[in-house]
Amino acid sequence: MNKLPYFLLMTVFLLSSCKRYSKYENIAFTEKEVRDWENPEMFNQNKEAPHATMISFADEKTALEGDKLNSPNYISLDGIWKFHYADSPDKRPFWFFKDDYDIRDWDNIEVPSNWQMKGYDVPIYVNIGYAFKKNPPYIPHEWNPVGSYKRTFTLPLGWKGKEVFLNFGAVSSAFYVWVNEQLVGYSQDSKVPAEFNITRYLKKGNNSLAVEVYRWSDGSYLEDQDFWRLSGIQQTVFLNARPKTYISDFFAVGDLENNYKDGVLKLDVSIKTASPDVNDFIIEAALFEDNEKIYAETKDVKLADNKASVNFTKQFPGIKKWTSETPDLYTLVLNLKDNFGNNLESVTAKTGFRKVEIFNSQLHVNGVAILLKGTNIHEHNDITGHVIDEATILRDIRVMKSNNLNAVRTSHYPNRELWYEMCDKYGLYLVDEANIESHGIGYDKDVTIADKKEWAAAHLGRMQRMVERDKNHPSVIIWSLGNEAGDGHNFLNNYKWAKARDLTRPVQYERAEKSTNTDERHTDIVCPMYARIPDIEAYAKDPKNDRPLILCEYAHSM
């Protein structure tokens, strides 16, 4: 063997490699004049509209099985990613989203996780106040840790011609995402999904994915909950392939009528298309009790402006009713077909028939006044932080049920989607609380950001993303506007939106109508914290009080 040419070849390779991996070291990176993470009106960039939880299945049979991991339309991106930690934005690797950026020396990190639980940065517990100097919407630049994540993925051949969505279950507190070096979008809200249509950014073969996560953002001023402050990609990440025309949302209401004896299913289905050349489709709604199909109905769909909405209504005499003690569930399947009857996709959800009302100053479920024997819950594990697995959820529910608890307030933010599925299944009434708390700002009506117009959209966006995601869960019987965030027109607007969007549930907020610039009612339930027994008795005896009083918080161990 002639070793000289081999030596020269290796020398050229090493020199080119060194050049390749050092090319970005001295290239300037231009920052925005107003940082997105210091702009309360910038919390969504290129995100999909919020919608009900759903995974696209190939057909009704696989939808009924409900095993998303075996769906050909689902790819989990959980696992080991490459990771870089910087303690301030100006120390982050600005060009890391480039495919030829050198990450060979980066660490590995598990996703989902909180990076503080993996040895980076420090977890911080705060009750009232912020972990940084308060100056909304600004964040200290000298200490705002940034986590940079990278990985690659390959699309299956069967995904050609489909719309591909990238879904982050939850990321704290703000992040950018790139696919194949192209900026896809930006997101805030640490407790609900962020979904992006990445179809136009994809290529055949290997694709790169880069995520830049900021520990603090202006959104952190709305996340001042009494708990451990942790950061990172903290819920599952996945890809979901959809046909060019797909079910974009659905709202299934299992109501009761005829003195609560009979059920009525009220169903709204939204359809979108990325292929405007074809506008005629068929949508089928089917309801199953165990494995028996008890209802099926098809309707023709004609799209206009690349979308359509279809409504179904069906009565069910003598239906089984959902309560915390009898959590009877039915399985809804929606099948979208082309005009020739070929199935394009199927989505599914569990539903239950129950009616939530307030009358005679009491909260009723299925016509019966109920006593909520509840608890508040945080998403927290001493080992994994805010990453909560199924075993933890089931253990918590088992403890609650064995101690005769029947209700939970998701204090003080929406929990992961699996939590709601388990509460539907095992029977717990939920007060679903929006991820809004600005306790550290103070409650004074001239100071609180609850009455600042520049914060209105951020307040509303958090309410909308919770309601739209969780609206199909029978366990959710009350919406909460948030926790300890002052009061003002931003909460009044959220209340009005929620009441218009969902006619089936009451809405509550503990700070409503206290030290506020608005005098309109915007809580259906008076829900004090730490109220004294004489005060509760006085409220109950006053004939002017026509709303239920339910303590939303009384004691905790934090």
Image (cartoon, helix red, strand yellow):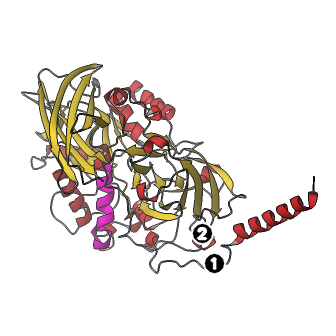
What amino acid does circle 1 point to?
Ile
Q: Is residue 21 above or below residue 70?
A: below
Neighbourhood count class around disc 2 (C-alpha, 10 Å): few under 14, some 14–19, many 20 upward: some
- Determine the CA span between mark 2 and mark 1: 9 Å
Circle 1 is placed at which residue position?
A: 27
Provide the residue span drawn in magenta: 451-466
Magenta portion: prevailing SS class = helix
Q: Residue furthest left?
A: 258
In what element is the residue under mark 2?
Answer: loop
What label sits on residue 323 in the rendered view?
A: none
Tell me whether the residue at label 2 lies in contact with that at label 1, contact meaning CB atoms closer than 8 angstroms.
yes
**Relative height, residue 466 to residue 345 (above, below):** below
What residue is drawn where x is 47% and y is 66%? 217
Q: In this image, 147 relative to 445: left or right? A: right
Residue 142, x across and y down, in percent: 59, 74
Q: Which residue occupies 44% across, 71% down?
A: 36
Query: On residue 95, which mark appears?
Result: 2
Q: Measured from the top left, where is residue 253 in percent x and y?
A: 19, 37
Quick one: label 2 or label 1, which is nearer the N terminus? 1
Residue 458 in the magenta stretch? The answer is: yes
- Name which residue lies at 43% across and 49% down: 167
User: x, y (%) of residue 387?
Assistant: 52, 44
Please name whichever residue, 506 or 65, is drawn nearer the observer in this view of the structure: 65
Is residue 555 among what the camera can see? no
Q: Position of residue 475 (x, y in %)?
A: 29, 35
Would residue 255 be counted in the magenta stretch? no
